[in-house]
Image: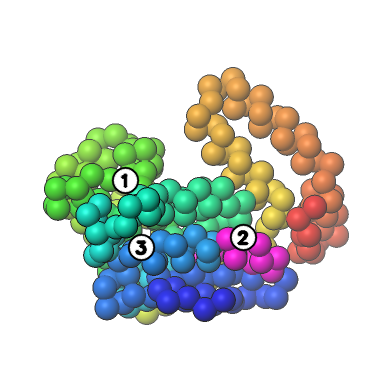
Amino acid sequence: MAYETLLIEHRGPESFQVSWLYLNRPQAMNALSMTGMRELREALIELRDRANTRAIVISGKGRGFCAGADLTGALPGDLPPGSPSFLDLGSAMEDVLNNLEKPVIAAINGVTAGGGLELALMCDFMLGTASARLGDAHANFGALPGGGATLRLPRVVGVNWARYLMFTGELLSAVDAQAIGLLIRVFPDETFEADVQAVAEKVAAKSPLGLKRMKMLVKDALDQTTAAALKNEKRVSAEHMVSEDAAEGGKAFAEKRKPVFKGR
């Protein structure tokens, strides 16, 4: 499917491909418009349902990952009565992204602020270029987060750093963002996409069923007591032990070869 604000590329081995989903408005630092939010939801559904896609990388074209929201024509007085608001479209997209069973990696290639940071926080983890700059930035414009920053940012970097980033609107360097756990790894700008692809292929080669269940367990554990989370983990692990992928993993280990997972 062709998109106005997005670009999709599939890379890697045919049996476990990595799909790159680019925000493609470089002239606007990939700020998310109403159209962009609708298309992002549609593209995520497309990749969710694509059998050969084992991992998804979200990145941006040009000098930025995403500078936040483009509210041109999206303010309450601009919209016809009864039409969905920008936050409505964001919530619909978020519902799809939050429930994706496939791994989703944010490849932070430049400026990432406001809603751009919130989009990255919805992914499973972030990898960044050495020149990346990240922050909340809502306070710089008298705005509030509406894409989950007040929930997700404290969970990733801790309450104090989350307050600092939200209250100051400061953009951190890649080095500082990695130091507080916002970026997991930082790669040179010149080799960034190849380095991210290597990480994504490493993930994509794993059992789709195992990754799906790990994502579910981690997500559920954040809202459970310790006892409930441990009980749930043991239950799901017992179910997984009788799966075809678990058997293939054990067989491949014994035969000293790479496993071929089918997601069953």
Mark pair 3, 2: CA separation: 21 Å
- In this image, 217 relative to 6: left or right? right
Residue under label 1, please give it: 146
Secondary structure at numbered mark 2:
helix
Corner quadrant of residue 172: bottom left
| Residue type of the residue flagged with mark 1 | Gly
Q: Are marks 3 and 2 in contact (CB under 8 Å)?
A: no
Q: Position of residue 6 (x, y in %)?
A: 44, 73
Mark pair 2, 1: CA separation: 24 Å
Q: Position of residue 47 (x, y in %)?
A: 59, 65
Q: Nearer the viewer, mark 1 or mark 3?
A: 3
- In this image, 193 relative to 241: left or right? left
Secondary structure at numbered mark 3:
helix
Q: Which mark, by number, is residue 48?
A: 2
Q: Residue at x 53, y 64 (%)?
A: 42
Say if the magenta span includes residue 26.
no
User: Bounds of the magenta span?
Assistant: 45-57
Residue under label 3, please give it: 34
Q: Residues within 10 Å of mark 2 (few under 14, many from 20)?
A: many
